């Protein structure tokens, strides 16, 4: 492996890093496994063993690592907005430590039971088929925005229990919120207009969801809002937490999985012999999906804060400092994965991949995401024969925490029976 490219190892927004972070991962693992990055104002921990240990280490906290927003001086209007946003940052399990995280996690755990997952598999297959019916005669599809994003909204809204008539508005609000989160998180001094609009967006989302919470209070259904309402009745969850968790689930489920689908399809198209192996031997699908998730990691790193002074690989980390736990780098650690830079769809499952984290925050939707990929990937290649890239170059989003493509334009051959039907 060549040394990392680019002039500045700390600049995680440079195009070379966004296109291929692996040279940087290996450079850090071999030379500076606990690296201070002044641009991130935090430590980057890159070796598999250290990542695994940190994710179980009670001396680090997942609580509100972006809480600095709340410490700057704010106008009266901004204060109102920030107090509305605050629970969304601080009261969702992803950004909480036990005991609050443990309580919320226990409530949501039932949402991902094997039974519910089996029911969801049928629905996911139905959504995919419906969407592909629409595009199959076109010979072209932009996978990210035309397929992955809308599909995953359908899946998560179905899981929550939002009815189809609420979907268009919910999509609009969650899309806008995603953009605002990036703007608000990317600077310690977010623009006032972004803070104010973000609070407004969350208010509108609460207004949209409230009637369905009310409905489930009267008449529970087989959905996640009903699960949360039951917990509310037992006194285990507040109404505010229901709103926060609904949003959390949409964000946790949506962009991560969309990125996994698109970067996964890209990886298969760039490694045609691996795609061929998978197509000739569908039994390896679970292994292939695991390998795709090892190789194309959406959540590249997760932030933590040291609660006390700690030492990793002889490097001293001070209490209060930020640590970026590099999940993606761990998946490319050659001490744990042979030939990590090669996509190998038959790779035996020996080591846990870090794509879904580890320990108490281990992804609640991991089994759902795996199931989605197991449905979507073979269906795409079966229903869209000759699927291929429409362009030789791809554009990566300027985001080093969540890796993904801006878009993935693809071409395919229109199946004879479809072009016949269309004519
Ligand atoms: C390929 C898709 C996905 C990836 C790569 C992914 C990745 C992750 C990672 C790395 C974490 C741990 C974060 C940390 O330790 O700080 C996490 C947590 C979480 N994920 Fe996922 N996720 C995916 C899909 C989903 C889906 C589909 C859902 C729900 C429907 C979901 C819900 C959650 C929740 C609720 C947590 C927080 C768990 C906790 O803090 O206890 N994720 N995810």
Image: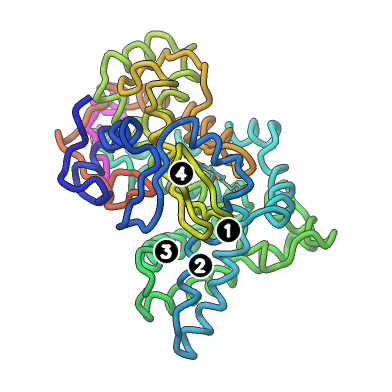
For disc 4, the neighbor class at 10 Å (few under 14, some 14 to 19, many from 20) is: many
Q: Position of residue 350 (x, y in %)?
A: 52, 16
Looking at the rendering, the stretch of residues picked out in magenta corresponds to 407-423
**Upstream in sequence: badge 1 or badge 3:** 1
The CA distance from mark 2 to mark 3 is 13 Å
Q: Which label was assigned to residue 325?
A: 4
**Upstream in sequence: badge 4 or badge 1:** 1
Beta carbon of the mark 4 residue lies under 8 A of ligand 1: yes
Is there CB contact under 8 Å for labels 1 and 2? yes
Magenta stretch contains residue 408: yes
Circle 2 residue: 67
**Secondary structure state at the residue bearing disc 3:** helix
Q: Is residue 370 left or right of residue 57?
A: left
Beta carbon of the mark 2 residue lies under 8 A of ligand 1: no
- Closest to the camera, between mark 2 and mark 3, is 2
- Closest to the camera, between mark 1 and mark 3, is 1
Beta carbon of the mark 3 residue lies under 8 A of ligand 1: no
**Upstream in sequence: badge 4 or badge 2:** 2
């Amino acid at each position: 492996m060549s040394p990392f490219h680019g002039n500045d190892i700390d600049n995680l927004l440079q195009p070379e890093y966004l296109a291929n972070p692996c040279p940087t991962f290996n450079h850090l693992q071999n030379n500076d496994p606990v690296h201070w990055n002044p641009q991130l104002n935090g430590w980057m921990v890159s070796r598999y063993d250290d990542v695994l240990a940190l994710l179980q280490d009670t001396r680090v906290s997942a609580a509100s690592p972006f809480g600095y927003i709340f410490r700057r001086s704010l106008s009266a209007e901004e204060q109102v907005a920030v107090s509305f946003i605050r629970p969304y940052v601080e009261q969702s399990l992803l950004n909480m430590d036990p005991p609050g995280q443990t309580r919320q996690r226990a409530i949501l755990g039932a949402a991902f039971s094997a039974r519910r997952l089996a029911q969801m598999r049928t629905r996911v297959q139905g959504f995919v088929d419906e969407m592909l019916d629409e595009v199959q005669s076109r010979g072209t599809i932009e996978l990210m925005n035309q397929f992955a994003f809308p599909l995953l909204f359908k899946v998560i809204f179905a899981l929550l229990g939002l009815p189809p008539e609420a979907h268009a508005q919910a999509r609009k609000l969650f899309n806008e919120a995603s953009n605002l989160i990036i703007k608000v998180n990317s600077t310690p001094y977010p623009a006032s207009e972004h803070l104010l609009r973000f609070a407004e967006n969350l208010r509108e989302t609460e207004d949209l969801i409230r009637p369905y919470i009310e409905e489930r209070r009267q008449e529970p259904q087989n959905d996640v809002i009903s699960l949360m309402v039951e917990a509310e009745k037992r006194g285990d969850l507040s109404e505010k937490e229901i709103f926060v968790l609904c949003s959390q689930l949409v964000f946790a489920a949506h962009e991560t999985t969309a990125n996994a689908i698109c970067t996964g399809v890209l990886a298969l198209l760039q490694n045609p012999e691996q795609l061929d192996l998978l197509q000739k031997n569908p039994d390896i699908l679970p292994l292939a999906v695991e390998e795709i998730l090892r190789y194309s990691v959406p959540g590249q790193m997760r932030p933590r804060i040291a609660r006390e002074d700690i030492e990793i690989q002889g490097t001293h980390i001070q209490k209060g400092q930020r640590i970026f736990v590099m999940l993606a780098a761990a998946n490319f650690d050659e001490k744990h994965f042979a030939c990590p830079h090669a996509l190998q769809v038959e790779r035996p499952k020996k080591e846990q991949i870090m794509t879904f984290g580890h320990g108490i925050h281990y992804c609640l939707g991991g089994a759902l995401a795996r199931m989605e990929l197991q449905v979507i990937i073979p269906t795409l290649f079966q229903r869209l024969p000759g699927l291929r890239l429409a362009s030789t170059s791809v554009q990566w989003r300027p985001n080093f925490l969540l890796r993904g493509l801006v878009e993935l334009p693809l071409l395919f051959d229109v199946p004879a029976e479809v072009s016949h039907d269309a004519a």
